[in-house]
Image (cartoon, rainbow, N blue to C red):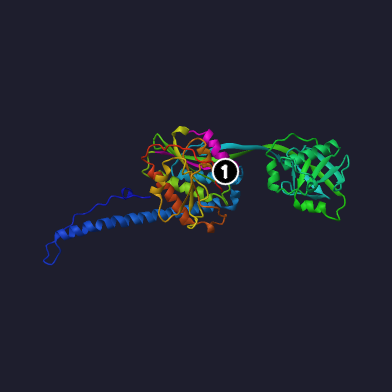
Amino acid sequence: MISAKDLPKIHHSPVVIRNFAAGPKKTDCVKKITWLLPLVLTTMFANAQKKNDRKTLTNLQQHINYLNNDKLEGCRTGTPGEQLAAAYISSQLRQMDITPKGADGFLQTFTISERREPTGTCAMSVNKDPLHVGTQFIPLPFSAGKSAKGEALPNVNEPDNIWLINVSELDTGHFKSRLALYQQQTQIAAQSGATAVVFYNGKETPEEVNGWLAQNPPLSTIPAVWVNADISKKINADDASAFQIELQVSLEKVKHTGTNVIGYIDNKAPKTVVIGAHYDHGDYDNASGTAALLEIARLLKTSRFQHHNYLIIAFSGNEQGLSGSKYFTTHSNVELSQINYMINMDMIGQLDPAKGLQISGTGSSPGWPAIISGAAARETKLVYDSSGIGSSDHTSFYNKNIPVLSFFTGHHSGNTGNINYNGALSVVKLVYDIIGKTNSMEKLVFSSTPQATAKK
């Protein structure tokens, strides 16, 4: 990563040799100095390399520890934790004197979705015990915003009362989705005079049902809610009698936004390289990739690789269909035709020497194999995947006919003790060296690849 030309110049003082009878000849001293000089340079180079590696390792640990902090809530898109992470990444880029390139400083915001969400007045109780909205009960997205109250019995469906519908007894065969089934059953109940519907014994998780709120089906005329497994057990108990149920459904449309963090190293070059990583879900997903992104940015800022400009992008919205990188590629303030290639780092913190480092996108340009082989260290096992399509943000650039590479070592937990920091350092050095190999090359040629989807 550091060449001899990056080292300080060595100034040699004149050598004074006295003519001692037993002393060495002047030519012998010159030969000895000439022989020692490469050794001195090699030692200095090795020491500088070790010092730089130690700094990178320390910084990687600092970045990952911060992004793994519980207060960041996993850096989930649209949360206050995401904003804290974005502020941290921005501050690091600012300290490196990297130019902001977002719409608002380093930040580029984008809309992920508009969804209906429960308001503060949304409530439900069973036998006067209040239930927690979002976990124990969840309004369905087609639910009417109304209240209902009654004494309900399972499988006893009376007009002008709340219906309790056992999902496990329904015929689900000809429905495209469970949501469509619930919508049809609610319509039947409303036409039969029900004042509300409570679905129990559904096999869905609360996360799945909450996800339905991003959909916008036609609204029903009565409230409809889903209850979780614990509440279902109470309703389904053998000794269960009538249940006093009160509910108030109140939903509002909420717009969710994500934030990309974008920095720019402007070398006044005609071509630009994009280096990216996603930072959402940082606690167990990609704190390592984001940390590596920051370190590569730091190295490039002071490097001699000045035949490219560099866009440094920490993407949000990866877990929402790559929405952050998709938004960037349609709202870039750098012409896409100027982008030479894109490098992506997704979870590079758990390198297993036996399994190796996976590099995807090697078929997206005919130039990649020679470049990678010229930069790769022999001690690192590499596993190649030619496809430019996968479950990470390089896909958004590949779909714009831009050559890509994506680096991946496998899953790791949020426990920073499980992170292989030396492995992460080796990925940083490999990516940096690949960038160096392309410094004086012509623009890479794009080529399409088999459309296989890589597993994450």
Label 1 environment density (alpha carbons within 10 Å; few <14, some 14–19, many ≥20) = many
Position of residue 383 in the picture relative to residue 140 (left or right): left
Residue 259 lies in what quarter of the image?
top right
Label 1 amino acid? Asn
Please say whether residue 162 is visible from this viewpoint.
yes
Q: Write the residue at 19% across / 54% down.
A: 14
Mark 1 lies on a secondary structure that is loop
Q: As displayed, is residue 395 above or below residue 240?
A: above
Position of residue 422 in the picture relative to residue 141 (left or right): left
In reply to whether residue 316 is colored magenta, the answer given is: yes
Residue 117 spot, x, y in % from top left: 70, 40
Compare residues 199 and 22 and report the one nearer the observer.
199
Residue 213 lies in what quarter of the image?
top right
Residue 99 spot, x, y in % from top left: 45, 39
How many numbered marks appear?
Answer: 1
In reply to whether residue 320 is colored magenta, the answer given is: yes
Position of residue 217 in the picture relative to residue 129 (left or right): left
Residue 402 spot, x, y in % from top left: 47, 37
Which residues lie in the magenta part? 308-333
Please say whether residue 119 is visible from this viewpoint.
no
Q: Write the residue at 71% across / 44% down.
A: 209
Where is mark 1, residue-wise? 318
Position of residue 454 in the picture relative to residue 202 (left or right): left
Compare residues 217 and 149 and report the one nearer the observer.
217
Residue 368 spot, x, y in % from top left: 42, 43
Compare residues 145 and 234 and report the one nearer the observer.
234
